[in-house]
Image (cartoon, helix red, strand yellow):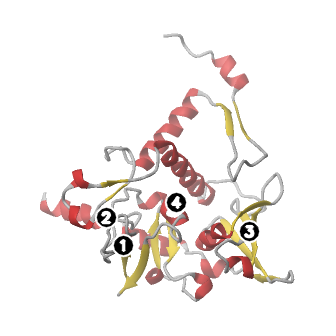
Amino acid sequence: MALPDEEYSERMRGIRVSRRSRRGLRRIYGDVTEDVAAQFDRLVDAHLNPRVQDRGPRFVDAEAVGAPDDCVPDPRTIDQKRHDAFASILSAAAGAAETPTLGGAAPTLIITTTEEDLATPNGVAFLESAAGPVPVPASFARHVGCHRTIHRVTLATNGPIKALRVEDRVFNHWQRKAIGARDGGCVIPGCTVSAAWCEVHHVVDWAKGGPTSVDNGVLLCWHHHRGIETSGWEIRMIDGMPRVRPPGWVDPQRRWREPNRLLLNELRRARSA
């Protein structure tokens, strides 16, 4: 086996992101050193949880609890799972204390939309980028409503800023810790993403009067958080505990059930050992 050419790899390393979007996608290309590639692979592997046979979350039918062979597979491809893991890694890095700041604040994306677009299923928003404003679906603006490092600016129809109250709608450090201890990871049944990689979601949307409190927040992985409005999964809170209802393709009867409780399950296993 030939040893890597260190001088060549140092000279040729680099990553670029295309400035032009193709149907909402940007291409990443370049070459990374062996150690960077290895670190990336380790982070993605940790996110996808290698204990699961297909290296990604699996969704369990209500009648299949305790029968893992009857699990409904996650419909994403392995490349889609790796993309979503990469998104979670970037989100966690942007909010980390060790990340360099921009103007004294964490690196923050700004997404702008109007009240009308925010309330419309097919509305449009604009994401700030180095290439200028990029159009994205308004559903993306709704998704980032409780995100730490992506802030939403809502404009009135005639232009003035209508809402930017980040401090009221972003869960603080201690709230995230408490919700993480309760949920242990993504609350969607069968999802294996742990709390460290999750985002906190307002069960009742902040824009609709939902409070930023532990009784109105649940952990969702990047994939489930981004698609919560369109995937068919529903979440509600009962006495401070989340309940979830799956889409019809998982459970035709769409029965409410307890969510994932990864940490609690680990504690139960430890007690019975």
Which one is closest to the eye, mark 2 or mark 3? 3
Instruction: State if disc 3 and disc 2 touch (CB < 8 Å).
Output: no
| Mark found first going from the N terminus, 1 or 3 | 3
The residue labelled by disc 1 is 182
Q: Quadrant of the C terminus?
A: bottom left
The residue labelled by disc 3 is 125
The relative height of residue 261 versus residue 12 in the rendered view (above or below) is below
Query: Between marks 4 and 2, how big is the CA–CA gap?
Result: 19 Å
Which percent across, then down, holds residue 203?
Answer: 48, 79
Q: Amino acid at mark 3?
A: Ala
Q: Secondary structure at mark 3?
A: strand
For image coordinates 37% across by 74% down, the residue present is: 245
| Mark found first going from the N terminus, 2 or 3 | 3
Query: Between marks 2 and 3, how big is the CA–CA gap?
Result: 37 Å
Q: Secondary structure at mark 1?
A: helix
Which percent across, then down, holds residue 109?
Answer: 71, 62
The residue labelled by disc 4 is 222
Q: Residue 263 bears which disc, if any?
A: 2
Q: Amino acid at mark 1?
A: Arg
Q: Nearer the viewer, residue 264 or 157?
A: 157
For image coordinates 62% across by 84% down, the residue present is: 207
Instruction: State if disc 2 and disc 4 touch (CB < 8 Å).
Output: no
For image coordinates 63% across by 82% down, the residue present is: 168
